[in-house]
Amino acid sequence: MSDKVLMKGNEAIAEAAIQAGCRYFFGYPITPQTEVAAYMAKKMPKIGGVFLQAESEVSAINMVYGAAGAGARVMTSSSSPGISLKQEGISYIAGANLPCVIINIVRGGPGLGGIQPAQSDYFQATKGGGHGDYHLVVFAPASIQEMVDLTSNAFDVADKYRTPVMIIGDGMLGQMMEPVTFQSKETASLPEKPWATTGTKGKREHNIINSLYLNPEDLEKNILERQERYNTIKANEVRYEAVGVEDADYVLVAYGMTARIAKNAMATLRKQGIKVGLIRPITLWPFPTEIFEKTAKTAKAFLSVEMSMGQMVEDVRLAVNGACPVHFYGRTGGMVPTPDEIINEVKKIGGVL
Amino acid sequence: MGKTTEIMIAGFGGQGILFSGKVIAYAGLMNNKEVSWLPSYGPEMRGGTANCHIIISDEPVGSPIIVNPDVLIVMNKPSLEKFENAVKPGGVIIIDSTLIDRKVTRDDVTVKYVDATQIAMDNNSPKLANMVIIGAMLKATGVMTLDEIKKGVEKSTPASKAHLVDSNMGLISAGYNG
């Protein structure tokens, strides 16, 4: 038997980051992600890493900026209100083309909102929560094992494309425990970062980490170069899971925990003879557009199910592009949709109710 | 029990609700089942309410949220009021009758009343009522054996507290035989 352990999502993310070679963590506690920081506080000093609880989220993200500029594998984590505070720093990090990993274990908002699970930060994560022409690569795991695997992958993608990567989960994923295994990873083979500010030792030109380009020609060039990388990311890094979509009349669309609830609903509906499929975007950005284009040719309708008032549904509509109707069902503010609610929505759409 | 067993445990914070759930989940894992453990979380503290959802299955667990449990373990009265009607018809309710002075009103479920807190106090372990009630649950449901739960107790107990495995198992046995 492989060595499976029960871990909370938050702890699993922290351990996965350490195993991926992350040795710098800067954060500030907030429910429901505090276990990430607590785990880092316990482990980092034992392995020669740095755990630092900053005086605020703003400070923590700027420490990430500094460490990323020096070429370190670095991570920060927070929950919704804290992620809002980090937006300025995230924009700067994107503008300076630096890799880092940012965890958002989402709670209900806006404002201080609540502490129960939500998915209402989809817009902020995928459309650029800070200012300027940039994107984050956004991973949305649906299980603790996937949180582990995607955290590891997030560092690689961040380094490869010199971009901040966000992992977005909801409070339930952070708090629940499931069995996980860790694949031992070659941390020795971390990529070279010739652009990092590691000291010239008098032997090379200075490396400069900066997001200020007062000359518009230069700024446009910088943005266009980044856009090229985004195009490569779109071509190479799209991930999704599609279940039962080939013969589906109705296709549920959900990510993270909501996708698991949707799967339960799908199983019940299939037993009742209603052909239902599920598309689960794993990358929220880049959005898995192609599977929607393909599925829209045979499906009668899509139903986006979210813990929000309808955010991802806009990307679903763009991807389906009018080929068939796209419906929405959501709960918000920390409330979680039940399988029965989803079943009722599908039946309403199908005219069964 | 079928291929999937959904167990909900509810009571006051400080009764070891979440830990007893962890014991059951780890026992499932050690016996090659698929498991999930979902706690209530929030501004909770000793004396507030706590609950957790444990799913043990032969198949990968879908949603970890339990709406209608097969098995409900309740260790305080507010939890019985809140969750009694959620239990599936034909399900099982385990009640700590030291702390809950009323009976279950439904007649379509199996109910086991166990003086868990009293038994724990009689064994000089007032904080281990959660183990007693696990024992009673095993007896009433057959969801796993005492040997199987022992693996869960061992895995859930930190090495520095390994001496507590025997006392925990003693209380589980007391609940099983009680």
Image: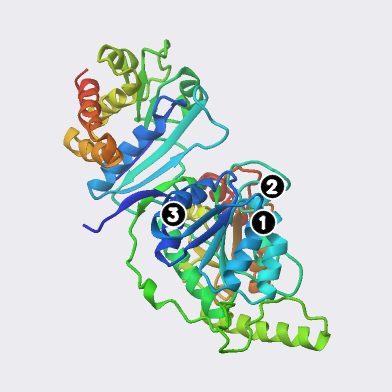
Chain letter of the residue beneath label 1 in the structure image = A
Q: Which mark is residue B116?
A: none
Q: Amino acid at mark 3?
A: Pro
Q: Residue furthest left?
A: B147
* Eye-nearest disc, 3 or 1: 3
Residue for point 58% across, 67% down: A67
Q: Secondary structure at mark 2?
A: loop
Residue for point 66% across, 44% down: A333
- Do the residues marked 3 and 1 share a common chain? yes
Left or right? Give the position of B98 relative to A316: left
Report x, y in % for residue B158: 30, 39
The number of numbered badges drawn on the structure is 3
Q: Earlier in the sequence, mark 3 or mark 2?
A: 3
Point out the image quarter for the N terminus of chain A.
bottom left
The residue beneath circle 1 is A59
The residue beneath circle 3 is A45
Q: Amino acid at mark 1?
A: Ser
The residue beneath circle 2 is A109
Report x, y in % for residue A64: 60, 64
Left or right? Give the position of A231 relative to A244: right
